[in-house]
Image (cartoon, rainbow, N blue to C red):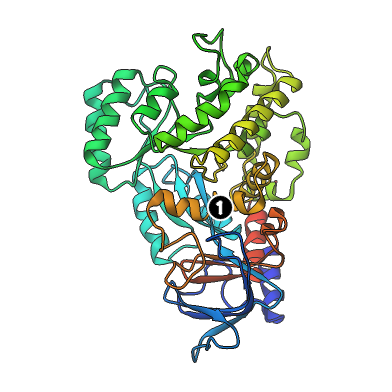
Amino acid sequence: MLKYAIIAILSVLGLLPDPPAMAQSAGTYAITNVTVVPMDRERHLPDQTVVVRDGRIAAMGPAASTPVPDGATRIEGRGRYLMPGLAEMHAHVPPQADQAQWTEDVLFLYAANGITFARSMLGAPHHLALRERAARGEIVSPRIYTSGPSLNGNSVATPADGRRMVAEQKAAGYDFLKIHPGLDRARYDAIAEAARTAGIPFGGHVPVDVGLARALEVRQATVDHLDDFVTALLPEGAAPAGPGGFFGIYHAGAVDAARIPALAQRIRAAGVWNVPTESLIHHVLLASPTTEELLARPETAYVPPPMRAQWVQARNSQQAQPAYDAATAQRFTELRGRVIRALHDAGAGLLLGSDAPQIFQVPGFSIHHELRVLVAAGLTPYQALATGTRNVAVFLGEEGQAGTVAAGQRADLILLEADPLADVANVRRRAGVMVNGRWLAEAQIRARLAEIAARYRS
């Protein structure tokens, strides 16, 4: 079979130190002579040695004066750049317990693309065990931070039902609660109050009957997809006219763009974080690239054919709506870009997320498109990368533990062949990834990717 031929060739060439399905165990490593991009601020630290031991950065300093421990595995960093691992803050781990292979493939695809933390937005009971397996290094996976099952208009029948579900999910050990559409104000408020009392955050969508203003009042932890922003930007006293379509696209022409800065300031004052998932919006609504061009992208090979077919159907369905036209979609995405830039300029919290593996969001690969879209909206490469590194540590209360490259931090790292601060696309130029102190060399990554592609070849 193709996958065994590839593995055999890599083994002969000495490029495969471990089986491609697994990372090496957390041990002692020294990345030598490397330029560190620490992400504490916009800067480079040239000619550094970074020592990793048992999942943490044990030491970092000038290569000439930082000793390499005896027995450490050396990783050559000369001419390369070392930055923190990225977070996918709107990830989906497959919820079906009987899809173990696809689940492990999804988690690997995240890790292979430098995603070392995944905020899973649609939890299921078996994800709790999966979270622990990932933490122990039994599978190649980002660190998993998972919601419980969705709280929505169908799953929550009454306010009392909402309070009960919050208590159950907190007791089960989920990290946060996921809000989906369909909740009325009474059920949403009951969930918000129960969550505050229980000390568990909640985030996700903004139900239509709740509205963004109320989500800000109760300090919903995150608003994902910029949900309900279009309605909030309508002129004072105006009500939406007719169906809004996908995240309000058909109301976008009625917004008062002069209201954007004030809304961004309100969001900052509320302390609510924002996960735009702009790559999803582009791939669903924009006429270019075409569906055929999206299917032709190399990373689509890592997705099962039935899922690709579902993506095509969903995209075509959105673009077949009577009110849809390419110019409207372009104006809508440009408006969202202005909102993203305004949120950044106001100091409101921005987090990196792409909603993979939703429509044409190939896990891991879609985060690179998200980064490019953030730069197109007006952020610098450093500012875009901060949404997936240091900002995430601030959001989680893990400053000093994660999100930057420094002694004492978690050893979640990406080794790159080119400078990510010069061009955010350079994050794809990977030499290897370290996930929780476990090193994935580029040869291992490529071999496992070939295995996944062979499995889903149609």
Judging depth in this view, the residue of 59 and 431 nearest the camera is 59
- Helix, strand or loop at mark 1: helix
Q: Position of residue 383 (x, y in %)?
A: 60, 50
For the view shown, which residue lies furthest in the bottom direction? 70
Q: Position of residue 69 (x, y in %)?
A: 49, 89
**Point 53% across, 33% down: residue:** 225
Q: Quadrant of residue 251?
A: top right
Question: Image check: 200 left or right of 113?
Answer: left
Looking at the picture, which amino acid does disc 1 mark? Answer: Ala
Q: Position of residue 279 (x, y in %)?
A: 63, 39
Q: Quadrant of residue 162?
A: top left
Q: Position of residue 351 (x, y in %)?
A: 51, 45
Res 178 visible: yes
Judging depth in this view, the residue of 403 and 137 nearest the camera is 403
Q: Quadrant of residue 50?
A: bottom right
Judging depth in this view, the residue of 379 and 327 nearest the camera is 379
Total marks in image: 1
Res 457 visible: no
Question: Image check: 84 left or right of 424?
Answer: left
From this view, report whether residue 243 is shown above or below residue 457.
Answer: above
Residue, disc 1: 386
**Point 38% across, 55% down: residue:** 131
Question: Image check: 452 left or right of 50?
Answer: right
**Point 62% across, 42% down: residue:** 361
Q: Quadrant of the N terminus?
A: bottom right
